[in-house]
Image (cartoon, rainbow, N blue to C red):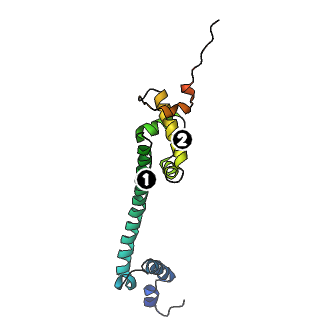
Amino acid sequence: MVFTTAVNFIRSRGPDEFWRKRKIFKLAAAFQGRKRNCYSIAIRYVHRALVYATKGRKLKKEDMANLWQTRVQAACEQHNISYELFREGLVRSDVMLNRKTLASLACWEPYTFKTLTDIAQRRVLDDGLVALNDSSLDRIITRGSLTIKSEPK
């Protein structure tokens, strides 16, 4: 650009300002009224919207974690084991599944989840954490439930 006077040179801010404003206006395209068309107002509302979006991402993660926890607890109640004992039994059995995986198993693979609850119950019973009177656990064999009997000489 060629400027005939120094005043025009000083007033020109160049292409950087155009693209900076364009970015803000693109983010404000869904707004209504002057929030969409007036740069000084649009920039305030765009910043506010970005703050809400940031908070929303964090809240979404918390909501999903609570949903998974609720689903696993409900499935544990169906199989007569508390969530705490279920998790402890899985940890002691070296079954490393997170809440998301357990929740999806509880929803879509109920037989697989039933097997996991049986394994956890058996492990809890073998380790003596709680006394359970459930004869259905006799079909689950773990290392702790095996006893080696030595033959008399």
Q: Amino acid at mark 2?
A: Thr
What's the distance in space between the residues labelled 2 and 1, CA to CA?
23 Å
Spot the residue most to the front.
135
Q: Which residue is mark 2?
A: 115
Tell me where residue 37 sits by quadrant: bottom left
Residue ID for mark 1: 65
Residue found at x 50% / y 46%? 98
- The residue closer to the viewer here, 53 or 25, is 53
Q: Residues within 10 Å of mark 2 (few under 14, many from 20)?
A: few
Q: Earlier in the sequence, mark 2 or mark 1?
A: 1
x, y (%) of residue 108?
53, 54
Towards the viewer: 61 or 121: 121
Quarter occupied by the N terminus: bottom right
Quadrant including the C terminus? top right
Q: Position of residue 74 (x, y in %)?
A: 41, 48
Residue under the point 45% across and 89% down = 6
